[in-house]
């Protein structure tokens, strides 16, 4: 078994309504910038599926779940969520929670 300290990971795919994928991705990039200095944030990556610009994938790694949960309280995060919600083509679903064991870029 791995001997590294386990971290909390989350991967969520957000689906934008038709024509709003790029706008949703831009808002999520703003969120990444805002959260980049949050306590415990190791990785916060925004991606789009190459063949489906409506899907925006958010991949996060945190020291622990508490740090992730606290990041949602950072000033400005609520406003970004409010801007993103109308762009969604379907309600956001709970993402995949991950137990991050290690790898490149994870200390």
Image: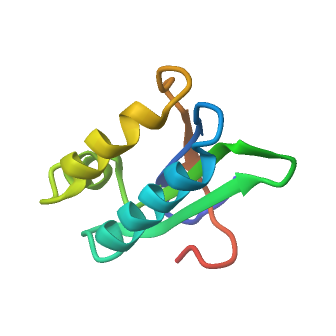
Q: Is residue 75 left or right of residue 7?
A: left
Q: How many numbered discs?
A: 0
Q: Is residue 12 above or below residue 51?
A: above
Question: Where does the image place residue 5, in percent across and percent down from the top left?
Answer: 49, 63
Q: Residue at x 65, y 33 (%)?
A: 18
Q: Is residue 61 above or below residue 83?
A: below
Q: Is residue 3 left or right of residue 31?
A: right
Q: Is residue 38 left or right of residue 22?
A: left
Question: Where does the image place residue 50, in percent across and percent down from the top left?
Answer: 83, 54
Nearer to me, 43 or 76: 76
Q: Residue furthest right?
A: 51
Q: Residue at x 45, y 56 (%)?
A: 28
Q: Residue at x 26, y 69 (%)?
A: 38
Q: Is residue 70 left or right of residue 88?
A: left
Nearer to me, 46 or 16: 16
Question: Where does the image place residue 53, in percent across and percent down from the top left?
Answer: 73, 48
Nearer to me, 20 or 14: 20
Q: Is residue 35 above or below residue 18?
A: below
Nearer to me, 18 or 94: 18
Which of the 4 quarters of the picture holds residue 83? top left
Q: Residue at x 52, y 53 (%)?
A: 23
Which of the 4 quarters of the picture holds residue 77? bottom left
Q: Is residue 98 above or below residue 42?
A: above
Which of the 4 quarters of the picture holds residue 32? bottom left
């Amino acid at each position: 078994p791995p001997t590294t300290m386990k971290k909390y990971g989350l991967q969520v795919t957000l689906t934008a309504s038709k024509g709003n994928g790029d706008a949703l991705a831009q808002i999520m990039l703003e969120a990444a910038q805002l959260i980049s200095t949050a306590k415990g944030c190791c990785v916060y990556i925004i991606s789009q599926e190459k063949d489906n610009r409506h899907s925006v994938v958010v991949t996060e790694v945190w020291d622990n779940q508490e740090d992730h949960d606290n990041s949602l309280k950072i000033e400005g995060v609520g406003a970004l969520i409010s801007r993103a919600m109308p762009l969604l083509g379907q309600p956001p679903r709970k993402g995949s929670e991950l137990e991050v064991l290690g790898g490149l870029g994870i200390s």
